[in-house]
Image: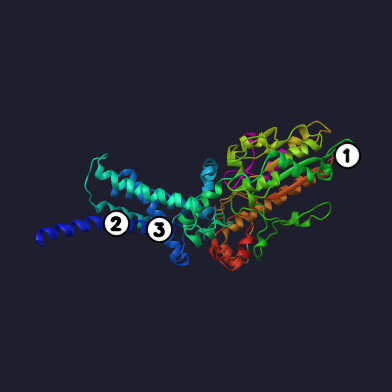
Amino acid sequence: MSSGKLKKGVLLFFRILAPVLLFVMVSVFEYFSVEMFLTANVIDIGLEFSIKNIVLLMLLNLFVIAITQYVRIGLIISEVLVLIVGIANYFLLQFRGYGIVMMDFFSIKTAGNVAGAYSYSVDKYFIAGVSIIIVCVLVTLFYKEEKHKYISLRGLLPSMGCIVIVAGFVIFNLFNEIFFSDVSALSWDHRIAMDQYGYFLYAVTNVGSATLKEPAGYSAATADKILNEYKSDESTALFAPSDGQAPNVILIMNEAYSDLKALGSFRTDKDYMEFYDSLEDNCVKGYLQSSVYGGYTSISEFEFLSGMSKAYIKGNPYLQYIKDYAPDLITNIKEAGDYKEAYAIHPYKASGYNRNRVYPLLGFDVFYDENSFEGAEKKRGRYITDQADFDFIKKLYEEKEEGEPLLLFNVTMQNHNPYTLINDYDVDDKLKITTVPNSPQAEEFLAGIRASDKALKDLVSYFEKQDEPTVIVMFGDHQPHLPDEFYKYVMGSNPKEFTVSQSAKTH
């Protein structure tokens, strides 16, 4: 073989090898970048799951390259997309504890409603994640490839080959779930699942959990038949008129209302649930388990109103499924008693979790949002206080006709995250955690719970003085997401190291 032919052979070899090496390098580095943004340890994820994450990124890169018909342009687009996802995950991790999942795409507007309340910071993980992508982009820019006509056969065949590979993978896994068989699609703690399986592998597996399939043999008639077997007048007797009048029914889902001592032992310089703890007579109280942690308020709301467990419902019902009349607790109470109207109250944006569209379908006749609270007291920067919220309830009671029972459901906002004002939060009665050092976010949260406790006392005291019978129900939607250091002191572990029993405590 002549030296000229040898040289051409070597050049051809490297021309073929170079894009392959670049393709593999970028896919691997993108994987490390995404996990860095989530402060995950790839060693804990392990070789098998790491390879599967990289394979998914390779498929993404193949698809983009096929669309653009250029390796360099395709990889740069992919790198930018991965960077956007990584940065979004980094900030989501700060205020709720885990990265993007499929359900988030249904609640983008709700997330936008509260995003402005957060303060953001970066650390070494953020810098490392960005730096890895920058290196990828620079290396990709150095790669040179021949220009070709977009519709040329030479450029079209490789693109078609890439699309066939991606389509083959998708079709194969629609009928055979070997690739995803050892990954839980519906982890009850997304952070643990992301740390265990890697972000992309879990996120892709979770996509299938956002849709519902009709059960075999289902029909509306069959459902009614089953329900009628359990129908009882006892369940609605409480709301039927007694001595000519049904009771006022005040239902309150208090934002993040929870006792952090469920997590472990700690002490504060002031009691933050003094009134609640003192309640004994004519009262039922205790702990409940929430399907969610640190967010997704509407899921707890849906469970309470519908009586259905989220365990059997994928995705977010308020955002995905409720598009027609849906009988629930409110409609049942209205049917059982003499309730002409049902009121919904939420002192924030009506569009949050699609409430302005969902509430009428759940039997509510009037919805009071933040526009009904003009001039109301706000704390922690932007949230209407529970006291102002409960004063509005008293106002509705005083404005109604005497003898006409009040029925309302109230979702408060005072204690919504973030808890990052770091000792500058404007709560009148601050407190200190004496056994956990440097816990300003937990202290801000508990100061808010103390304010809620005082507002509850005022509400109960008010209705105790009224002649009309009244039922008050108040519960929390979920626990707050707090810094890892707090959980380390109180529970002995960081959240990513929690056992199942420890994770259960956060619910």
Q: Amino acid at mark 1?
A: Ser
Q: Amino acid at mark 2?
A: Val
Q: Give the distance between the C-alpha atoms of the residues marked 3 and 2, in whole angstroms.
A: 14 Å
Circles 1, 2 touching at the beta carbon (< 8 Å):
no
First in residue order: circle 1 vs circle 2: 2
Disc 3 target residue: 54
Q: Is residue 459 left or right of residue 244?
A: left
Is residue 472 one of those drawn in magenta? no
Disc 1 target residue: 242
First in residue order: circle 1 vs circle 3: 3
Q: Is residue 162 left or right of residue 42?
A: left
Picture layout, residue 146 above or below residue 331? below
Q: How many marks?
A: 3
- Magenta extent: 371-393
Q: What is the x, y in percent for residue 287?
A: 72, 57
- Residue drawn 33% across the image and 54% down it: 134
SS class, disc 2 = helix
Query: What is the number of the mark on residue 20?
Result: 2
Picture layout, residue 166 above or below residue 52? above
Question: Residue 37 sits in which quadrant?
Answer: bottom left
